[in-house]
Amino acid sequence: MSGHEQQLVQETFASNWIAPLGPQVDAFEREICAYTAAPHALALSSGTAALHLILLHLGIGAGDEVVVSTLTFSASVNPILYCGATPIFVDSETESWNMDAHLLADLLAQKAAVGKLPKAVILVHLYGQSADIDPILALCQQYNVPLIEDAAEALGTLYKGRAPGTFGYAGFYSFNGNKIITTSGGGMLVSADQTLIDHARKMATQARDDAPHYQHSELGYNYRLSNVLAAIGRGQLRVLEERVAIRRRNFDYYQETLGHLPGLTFMPEAHWGRHSRWLTVIQIDPAQFGADREQVRLALEAENIEARPVWKPMHLQPIFASYECWGGDTAAHLFNHGLCLPSGSALTTADLERVAQAVSRQRVS
């Protein structure tokens, strides 16, 4: 917590406006727009809810295909299946670990040739680093396919000076408990399309029609954000830039203390923007390091240090294994060799030193 949250929550309690929606929600939406330069924003219960509502507004359903990055968390894919549509996975490139624009170009060309273009492309910005948006956006515009930006992990990140999530048709952020700022649970949909925002707001409130009685003409959902949680989010947003600086400091410490070890490399910072370093992620080559990723993870666990493998690619997940994937070897390699180190904003220098020493001890010369 930043210290600002308690005052804002107390104001919310004093106003007796506790239920979902309210002045804190309205203010949180305005402040996200001010920070990201997004024209419109809609506060929701999660980033997953935001993606689901975007897909519903686009009319995506059974028989439709949606392209999505394979190196991501399942929440980037699950809403596609909620709608009855079919995901198509695309591999990563090595500069940012995000979607490979060359593979996407091949995919769209082949789909166009058979008259079955996907209904949307979901571009994930991974671990606090923006994908290379320009070539992917150009491809989507060329084929008239909406670009949706999954910026759940990328609030505070920059692409050519702008916030990822604001380039495509729509984007969204997550405020889950592990994100760089949190409302404990929550998300934000952003878009230049006022019609999308208005429709998503309606669907998120059980799709209640504009009538004095309870009337419903379409299927609705309970995806609203609590006024109390929005107050927490406003307090967190005030220190977002400080949090980015802290996460980048964590990375700098790890790089300085571990960067010399043979076989250990870090997730690169692509030249096109600012990596928030939401997570510090390493790659371990067992032939050079003397231990593999899993051996290092288990050794850290034995010392009560939590580290996690890089996301297991979606095309390797049992539930998604039958779906089409373009490429896949790069994402698989990153998963097999990648480890996310402790990266929280509350880590002390002593904490960072303990983690670095524990990793160093696994190096077999």
Image (cartoon, rainbow, N blue to C red):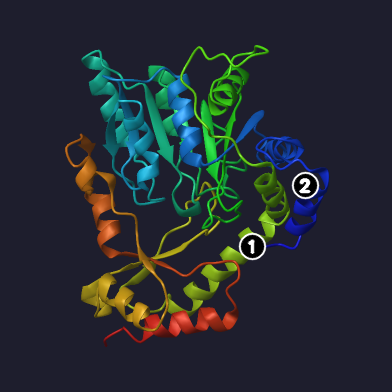
Is 67 drawn above or below residue 315 in the view shown?
above
Quadrant holding the N terminus: bottom right
Q: Picture quarter containing residue 21?
A: top right
Residue hosting label 2: 12
* Residue carrying label 1: 245
The amino acid type of the residue labelled 1 equals Ala
Q: Is residue 105 left or right of residue 233?
A: left
Is 344 positioned to the left or the right of 52 in the image? right
Q: How many other residues sit within 10 Å of disc 2, few (<14), some (14-19) or many (≥20)? A: many
Residue at the image point whose x is 79% and y is 54% from the top: 10
Image quadrant where residue 347 sits: bottom right
In the image, 93 versus 145, the foreground residue is 145
Task: Tell me the element at label 1.
Answer: helix
The quarter holding residue 167 reads top right
Residue 114: numbered disc: none
User: Which residue type does callout 2 highlight?
Assistant: Thr
Residue 74 percent coordinates (x, y): 35, 45
